Amino acid sequence: MSLAARVPGYLAAALFGRWPWCTAALALAVPSVYAQPAATPPAPQQVAPAPGLAPDNGLSLQQVVERTLLTNPEIQARYHDFQSALEGQTVARGAYFPQVNAQGYYGREFRRGVPDEGNQNWSRPGYNVELRQLIFDGFRTRNDVKQAGFDKLARFYDLLATSDSTAVEAVQAYIDLQRYRAMESLARQNYALHQSTLGQIDERTESGVGRRVDQEQAGGRLALAQTNLMTESANLLDVQQRFQRITGIVPPEVLLPAPDISSRLPDSPKDFNDSLRRNPSFLSKQASMQAAQAGVDASRGAFAPKFEFVATTGQDQNEPTAQYKDVKSSSVQVVMSYNLYRGGADSARVRQTAAQSYASRDLRDYTCRNVQQDLAVAWNNIRRVQAQLPFLRDHEIATSKVRDAYREQFQIGQRTLLDLLNTENELFESRRALVNAEYDLQIAQYRWLGLSHALLPALSLRPARDEMPEENGKLAISDDVIKLCNSLVPDSARLQPVKVKYNEGTLPPTLTPLTSSAPASGQDATLSRP
């Protein structure tokens, strides 16, 4: 089976023109998901990871996400859940169509105690064909179809939600791999620097210029640098395995920089209403709630009479004499059936479906709150790191200059070895903090887009809408429902840099927001370095 046979249409559409082998595979894609197979389809073939996927010039984030969406087992499971729900609605629609049943039989009939005839027995062959067409069943079938349709829509949004969350995981694994490679490189440089410093101290000690305590101190710092390098190397191995588990790709030697998506973020949003309305997890729970409401309406149909049109024809020798041997009979009827008592099962069924409807509504509200929280946390992380980055850059630049000055002063005896080693360590930590912040910002931005169902379009993987169920236009998400989530943007004023002016006496300090004279660095112009 081709790989395209396992790929949802909205994902496969993104692959035309991307990889040549995908184009050929998609030409043999499976028929429309609305086609009802005559037999059980075979299980899809497992797709092996592609260890040699990366080209010589490096692997891009878009390629990694594509491959992940193609091979991730959870996405495939959600896609088959969607197909199952689609066929479930076809099953429910079957009640609208006539049922035609044929019956044939052969046996003997015995009759006793017939006046003036005595006991009789004879062969009784026969057959009949019956056509039964539903006319009215209290709208039960209509609501069953409606319930199955919204359940299908919920499974579709589950598929989109799983695709978004998997794409976010792939993005984070990709960025973390770049992060820890940079961390390991910094730790290796730090180790080499301490090794060089120890070598210089050894030479000075052997020549009688240096002190033994400096040699011991430099050796201890070298051991600490070695430990840091070992820790970062272990962290890198961990994220490499995580990258391979999520993406199914052996980590390549070269990873291209992740695309800058800052332009796709809103400038100054007042709320997250639009993101909530697009979030597949929230939309899935809304569809499930409307499916449960349709289930309540369907259960009430049991209290209404059922009308059917019935047409039958057949042959049955119900008398022993030969003159009844070839008698055929046909009938056309409108049949009403009405249940008078079923042990309270129908009333219990209504109460059961009503409870399910309430549970689905509460689950929707719970999901809405969770999505709102995730959006707020991701947005707050974006604002926090954006505010921190200028200061982290300033700290790294200033510490680098101080380190260079201390090194020169150490050579002429104006600084102690402890001063130099402390400055080296501060520079190492400042660079680690800066690298972490830069990658944290990327992850927070991609995560926010994932929660807003905008990550795949940002990577030029726009989903095709040809499989969007028609019930999508019937989702009823009112403004009141969105307001229940309290989707206001968190106040980030405390994250803005301020200038502190200390007052005399017991008066508290005055905090003054910095002007926009130095927005790039986040510094007050009066505090900038010459």
Image (cartoon, helix red, strand yellow):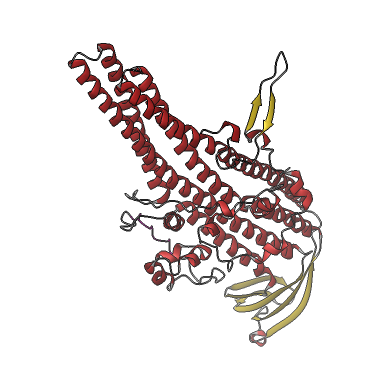
Q: Magenta stretch mostly in which secondary structure?
A: loop
**Which quadrant would the N terminus be assigned to in this image?**
bottom left
Q: Position of residue 210 (x, y in %)?
A: 24, 15
> Exactly how many numbered labels are in the figure?
0
**Residue range (magenta):** 42-50
Q: Is residue 80 left or right of residue 472?
A: left
Q: Is residue 249 left or right of residue 134?
A: left
Q: Position of residue 191 (x, y in %)?
A: 30, 29
Residue shown at 50% from the left, 40% from the top: 440
Residue shown at 21% from the left, 15% from the top: 205
Residue 43 in the magenta stretch? The answer is yes
Q: Nearer the viewer, residue 157 or 126?
A: 157
Q: Is residue 280 visible?
A: yes
Q: Is residue 347 visible?
A: no
Q: Nearer the viewer, residue 444 or 262?
A: 262
Q: Quadrant of residue 476?
A: bottom right
